[in-house]
């Protein structure tokens, strides 16, 4: 399997695009779920904790979660292989490098942006996902684990909020190139629908980035400043 992953460029590209699009769908669902954090405090706490319980106890969602973990690992490993192969084939670099003129800086630095996102994910999963599954969380009035209070207290730290914002900006640029690039892998370019897909990719990226950035800022201002 590993030699196949290393040798087949097309297979790697398709797998990268498939896992990338699946991760983008996860982001839409994850943002929608997290927007419940913005509800009035009493409602937000009960609703978010109920939602977290549902997301971690429903069998079908559990199975999708395992596909999600596998997709994150595959996407990261494949991107590492692609970056290393590109470096190798570029040799010592071009005498006259024209790539800056034909592509954006973020499409040439998907590896760096991906690394920032991976570092974010390690911290994020440790603080929320691991705490929820294996930590000793307090219970809310309904007898559910009080994940809401853990999230609210995490965003009371200004440096933590800034770290999240940096990660979400990196995620935004990563998606700006990634989503459209995945559509191109599936043959949507050049074609009549390519400009529509470009419009959808860009719109979705802006929505996700602004939505994710808004949450920690809102929580910091509402629960820790006001
Ligand atoms: C303000 C933004 C965010 C908040 C408040 C937030 C909050 C949470 C919380 C509370 C959990 C644990 C409960 C659960 O499993 O649903 C979680 C899990 C997770 N988050 Fe986030 N998240 C945010 C953004 C992101 C982003 C941008 C990514 C990806 C780049 C991400 C990736 C994940 C993953 C992979 C899990 C584990 C999901 C699972 O086990 O099914 N999160 N997040």
Image (tube, rainbow, N blue to C red):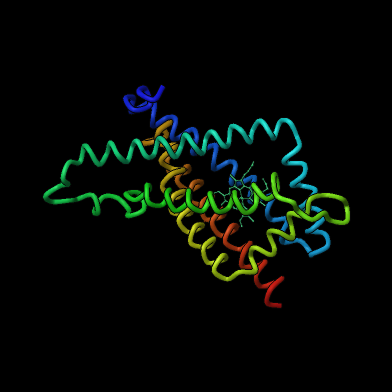
Q: Is residue 63 left or right of residue 85?
A: right
Q: Residue at x 59, y 49 (%)?
A: 125
Q: How many marks?
A: 0
* Residue 130 percent across, percent down from the top left: 64, 47
Can residue 97 be seen here? The reply is: yes
Q: Residue at x 17, y 51 (%)?
A: 97
* Residue 179 percent across, percent down from the top left: 46, 43
Does 8 appear above or below 43? Answer: above
Observer-nearest residue: 114 or 212? 114
Q: Residue furthest bottom?
A: 226
On the rendered image, what quadrant is the N terminus found in? Answer: top left
Observer-nearest residue: 101 or 35? 35
Does 7 appear above or below 22? Answer: above
* Residue 163 percent across, percent down from the top left: 51, 63
Dividing the picture into quadrants, the one containing residue 79 is top left
Q: Residue at x 80, y 53 (%)?
A: 47
Dividing the picture into quadrants, the one containing residue 4 is top left
Q: Residue furthest left?
A: 95
* Residue 211 percent across, percent down from the top left: 60, 58
Can residue 203 be seen here? The reply is: no
On the rendered image, what quadrant is the C terminus found in? Answer: bottom right
């Amino acid at each position: 399997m590993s030699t196949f992953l290393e040798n087949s460029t097309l297979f790697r590209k398709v797998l990268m695009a498939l896992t990338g699009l699946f991760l983008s769908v996860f982001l839409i669902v994850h943002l929608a779920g997290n927007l419940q954090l913005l509800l009035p405090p009493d409602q937000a706490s009960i609703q978010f904790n109920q939602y977290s319980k549902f997301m971690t106890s429903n069998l079908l969602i559990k199975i999708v979660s395992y596909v999600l973990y596998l997709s994150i690992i595959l996407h990261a490993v494949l991107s590492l292989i692609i970056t290393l192969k590109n470096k190798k084939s570029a040799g010592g670099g071009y005498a006259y490098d024209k790539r800056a003129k034909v592509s954006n800086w973020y499409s040439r630095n998907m590896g760096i942006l991906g690394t920032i996102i991976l570092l974010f994910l390690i911290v994020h999963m440790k603080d929320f996902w691991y705490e929820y599954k294996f930590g000793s969380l307090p219970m809310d009035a309904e007898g559910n684990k009080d994940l809401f209070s853990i999230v609210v207290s995490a965003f009371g730290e200004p440096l933590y909020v800034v770290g999240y914002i940096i990660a979400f900006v990196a995620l935004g640029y990563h998606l700006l190139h990634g989503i459209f690039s995945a559509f191109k892998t599936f043959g949507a370019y050049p074609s009549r629908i390519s400009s529509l897909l470009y419009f959808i990719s860009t719109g979705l990226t802006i929505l996700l980035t602004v939505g994710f950035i808004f949450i920690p800022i809102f929580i910091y201002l509402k629960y820790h400043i006001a």
